[in-house]
C-alpha cells in the first residue's frame, strides 16, 4: 500500500537517494546529507513546539509499505523570509505616452520584491518516475493540503508555491543565461546551491537595483518568464485545481511562476471533513478515489481510498487502517481526490 507520512530520522538515506534524482532547478531539495539531517531535525523541533516561527517546517515522504521503499517527498514551510530574505520578481506594467508624438506604449517590467514574506510555502515535491502511476502524484501533492486543513492554526493567512522554471533542450535556463548570469557572474547551479543553503546575501549585493524591461530581452527569455518546467507542469495543474493561482510573481533565477492562495480558500480547507472509522474486512471498492488522513501531527498519514464515506462513517479494510495507524471509533479527515466537476 502507498502511504504519505511524516518524515522520520531513519528516512535520511532514502531522502539522499531521492534528492540525487531531481535534476536542475530543485532548489529546496538537494542531495546534501548534512542539510537533509538538519531538515529532519527541524521538523521534529517544529512538531514539538521548540522551533521559532522562522524555522518551522514539515516534510513528508511517500512509502510503498509492501517494499518499505520511500519513493517520493514533499515539504511545507510555515513562514518564509522571516530571517533569510525571500526574493521574487513581481511582473508589473509601465506605460510610456506622448500626446505630441502620438505614441503610447505599454511594457512589462520585473521588480525585485519581498511581497511573499511570511507566506507558508509548498516545496520540495518530487516523485520517482516509476512511481508516477495510479494517482500517486496527486496523493503526494495533496497530502499537504490535508495537513493544512487539519492544523490551520499552525499557519498564517496565505500560501505560495514556486514552480521550477523553463529549461531549454540544451538544459539551460534562458532567463538565467540572459539576466541572472550578468549580475551574479556564477553558474546557475552554483547560485541555486548557495540559495538552497541559506547563503543569500550575494543576491542583495549583486541583484539589479532597477526594474528589468522585459521587452528588451531576447524573445526566448520573454517567453520563459512565468513558464513552468516541463516536468513540473503536472504539479502546477494539481495545485491550480486546489485553488492556487499565478499572481505575477516569478523566481529570480529561472523566472518560474509562483502560485499563491489564501489558505482559507484552499479546497481541502473548505471541503474536507472529519468522519468516524469502522474497520471492516468487507469494505467495498467503489471506484471513486478519496483522500483519508489521520489527526496525529507527529505521525501524520494520508492514503488514497477507492470508496467515499457514507454519511459520517468511513469503512476501512484492516490494511488501510494499519497504513493510517488508526482503529475503529477514531476519526479521519476525508476529501475527494479531485474536485467535483461543475456543469
Image: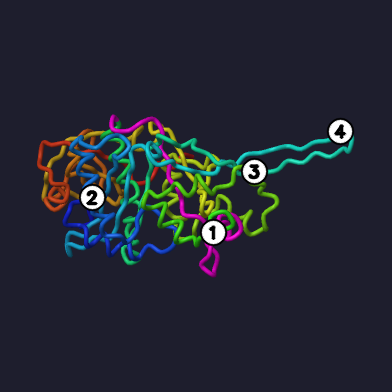
Q: Nearer the viewer, residue 81 or 241?
A: 81
Q: Looking at the picture, how far across and down is residue 72, in whole percent? A: 29, 58
Q: Looking at the picture, how far across and down is residue 247, in whole percent? A: 53, 39
Q: Residues within 10 Å of mark 3 (few under 14, many from 20)?
A: some
- Say whether residue 171 is magenta: yes
Disc 2 element:
helix
Q: Earlier in the sequence, mark 2 or mark 3?
A: 2
Q: Nearer the viewer, residue 206 or 57?
A: 206
Residue that label 4 marks: 99
Q: Kindly report which numbered mark, 4 or 1, lies closer to the viewer in this rendering.
A: 1
Q: Earlier in the sequence, mark 3 or mark 4?
A: 4
How far apart are labels 1 and 3 at the CA level? 22 Å
How far apart are labels 2 and 3 at the CA level? 39 Å
Q: Nearer the viewer, residue 25 or 324?
A: 25
Disc 1 element:
loop
Task: Name the disc covering residue 40, or none.
Answer: 2
Q: Is residue 208 left or right of residue 319?
A: right
Residue that label 1 marks: 185
Task: Name the disc covering residue 109, or none.
Answer: 3
Residue drawn at point x = 61 percent, y = 58 percent: 178
In which quarter of the view is residue 34 placed? bottom left
Q: Is residue 280 left or right of residue 126?
A: left
| Label 4 with label 2: CB-CB less than 8 Å | no
Q: Looking at the picture, how far across and down is residue 134, in whole percent? A: 32, 59
Q: Residues within 10 Å of mark 4 (few under 14, many from 20)?
A: few
Magenta residues? 153-180
Q: Is residue 311 left or right of residue 75?
A: left
| Label 2 with label 1: CB-CB less than 8 Å | no
Amino acid at each position: 500500500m502507498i502511504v504519505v507520512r511524516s518524515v522520520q530520522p531513519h528516512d535520511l538515506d532514502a531522502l539522499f537517494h531521492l534528492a540525487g534524482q531531481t535534476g536542475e532547478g530543485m532548489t529546496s531539495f538537494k542531495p546534501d546529507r548534512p542539510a537533509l539531517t538538519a531538515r529532519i531535525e527541524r521538523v521534529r523541533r517544529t512538531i514539538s513546539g521548540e522551533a521559532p516561527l522562522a524555522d518551522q517546517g514539515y516534510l513528508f515522504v511517500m512509502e510503498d509499505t509492501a517494499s518499505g521503499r520511500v519513493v517520493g517527498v514533499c515539504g511545507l514551510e510555515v513562514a518564509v523570509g522571516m530571517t533569510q530574505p525571500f526574493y521574487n520578481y513581481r511582473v508589473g506594467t509601465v506605460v510610456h505616452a506622448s500626446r505630441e508624438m502620438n505614441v503610447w506604449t505599454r511594457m512589462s517590467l520585473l521588480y525585485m520584491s519581498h511581497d511573499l514574506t511570511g507566506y507558508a510555502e509548498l516545496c520540495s515535491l518530487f516523485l520517482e518516475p516509476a512511481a508516477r502511476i495510479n494517482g500517486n502524484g496527486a496523493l503526494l501533492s495533496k497530502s499537504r493540503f490535508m495537513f493544512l486543513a487539519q492544523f490551520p492554526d499552525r499557519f498564517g493567512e496565505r500560501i505560495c508555491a514556486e514552480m521550477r522554471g523553463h529549461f531549454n533542450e540544451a538544459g539551460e535556463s534562458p532567463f538565467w543565461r540572459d539576466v541572472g548570469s550578468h549580475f551574479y557572474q556564477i553558474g546557475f547551479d552554483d547560485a541555486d546551491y548557495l540559495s538552497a543553503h541559506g547563503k543569500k546575501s550575494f543576491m542583495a549585493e549583486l541583484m539589479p537595483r532597477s526594474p528589468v524591461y522585459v521587452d528588451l530581452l531576447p524573445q526566448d527569455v520573454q517567453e520563459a518568464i512565468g513558464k513552468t518546467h516541463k516536468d513540473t507542469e503536472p504539479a502546477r495543474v494539481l495545485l491550480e485545481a486546489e485553488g492556487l493561482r499565478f499572481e505575477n510573481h516569478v523566481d529570480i533565477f529561472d523566472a518560474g511562476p509562483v502560485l499563491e492562495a489564501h489558505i482559507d480558500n484552499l479546497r481541502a480547507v473548505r471541503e474536507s471533513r472529519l468522519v468516524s472509522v469502522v474497520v471492516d474486512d468487507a469494505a467495498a471498492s467503489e471506484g471513486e478515489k478519496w483522500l483519508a488522513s489521520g489527526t496525529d501531527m507527529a505521525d501524520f498519514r494520508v492514503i488514497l481510498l477507492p470508496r467515499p464515506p457514507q454519511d459520517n462513517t468511513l469503512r476501512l479494510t484492516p490494511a488501510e487502517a494499519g497504513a493510517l495507524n488508526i482503529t475503529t471509533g477514531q476519526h479521519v479527515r476525508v476529501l475527494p481526490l479531485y474536485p467535483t466537476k461543475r456543469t
